[in-house]
Image: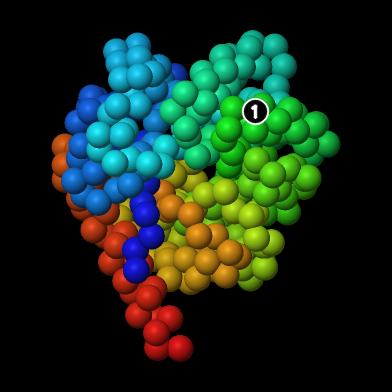
Amino acid sequence: MTPELIACYWTLAGQVIFGPDDYSSHDLKDRAQAAAQAGYRGIGLKHADLIRAKTRYGWEGLRGILHDNGLIHLEVEALGDWWGEGDARRQSDIVRRDLLEAAAQLGARHLKVYGAIPADAAPTVDVLRDAFDELARQARDAGTCVALEPIACSGIPCLDTALAILGDNLGNGAGLMLDAWHVARGGLPLEQIAALPPGAIAGAELDDGPLQGDDYLFETMNRRLLPGEGAFDLVAIINAIHAAGYRGPWGVEIMSDEQRAQPPESAAKRSFDATARIFMQTAEAMGRR
């Protein structure tokens, strides 16, 4: 049985180049309708796109778009430099304020955050833990959850580092975001994922791709395939995350030139259908055990 799925921001964003002004080339109404028609029960919004949509529709209008299309799961992203200083921190705090306000106004289930890229710019784990404590408290006050994503090329490359930063917030307004890309390409051990305590995983995402490459960050942004089209063992990844007790919705995050070229309707349908097939294969594999 396919769980409820979230069309992550990049999956339906269209012709967008990553950066501070990476708002979608498609209107939110069109993306929301396409997501719902394909079968999605949630959608993702990135900061620049969120602010643009809020300026056009207002909070009430955005709530109406989500409600009218039956999109009950919303994720907002993505916050970096939440530990920083100077201008980087000032810019991060603007994004933080906007995303937390959106979470409170729209009922977002989680806010995605990540570590320093490049990794050599990362502070110590102690500094990150103290900064994360404040962020997690603010998220709880806004009625949402912080989903911290381990990324191999970042300052939070593995589960051990992420768990050390999460600390006592784990399962208390914060948890891990586990993306199949970073699980497979980053070599996150499935045995360690399966042994995570209940509530440790705040969100999970599916995509596919090659197991090796020359430029991790570039390929992360441009080489993600539909589930089932790459070399990842998605059935094993799903089973490990399920074993850890995660029962929430799954995001679908496809980032490639081919996906960006699709209009919202086909971008939504092709990604939803491919993901549904993977969950069907997972159910069949479980049935054979």
Q: Residue furthest right?
A: 126
* Quadrant, the C terminus: bottom left
Q: Which residue is mark 1?
A: 141
Q: Classify residue 140 as left or right of residue 6.
A: right
Residue in the image at 80% along x and 31% along y? 130
**Residue 245 showing in the rendered view:** yes
Q: Is residue 22 above or below residue 87?
A: below
Task: Tell me if mark 1 has few (under 14), some (14-19) or many (20+) residues whose alpha carbon lies within 10 angstroms of its own.
Answer: few
Residue drawn at (31%, 34%) of the image? 67
Q: Is residue 277 left or right of residue 90?
A: left
Residue 123 shows up from this direction: no
The quarter of the displayed image where residue 135 is located: top right
Which SS class for mark 1?
helix
Q: Count of labels shown? A: 1
Write down the quadrant of residue 22 in the picture. Answer: top left
Residue 161 screen position, x and y as percent: 73, 48
The residue positioned 38% from the left and 60% from the top of the image is 3
| Residue 197 in which image quadrant | bottom right
Q: Which quarter of the rendering shows the N terminus?
A: bottom left
Question: 102 left or right of 276?
Answer: right
The spot of residue 211 in percent (x, y) is: 45, 61
Q: Looking at the image, which residue is at 37% across and 46% down?
A: 6
User: x%, y% of residue 91?
Assistant: 58, 14
Say above or below: 77 vs 179.
above
Residue 126 position in % (x across, y down)? 83, 36
Q: Amino acid at mark 1?
A: Asp
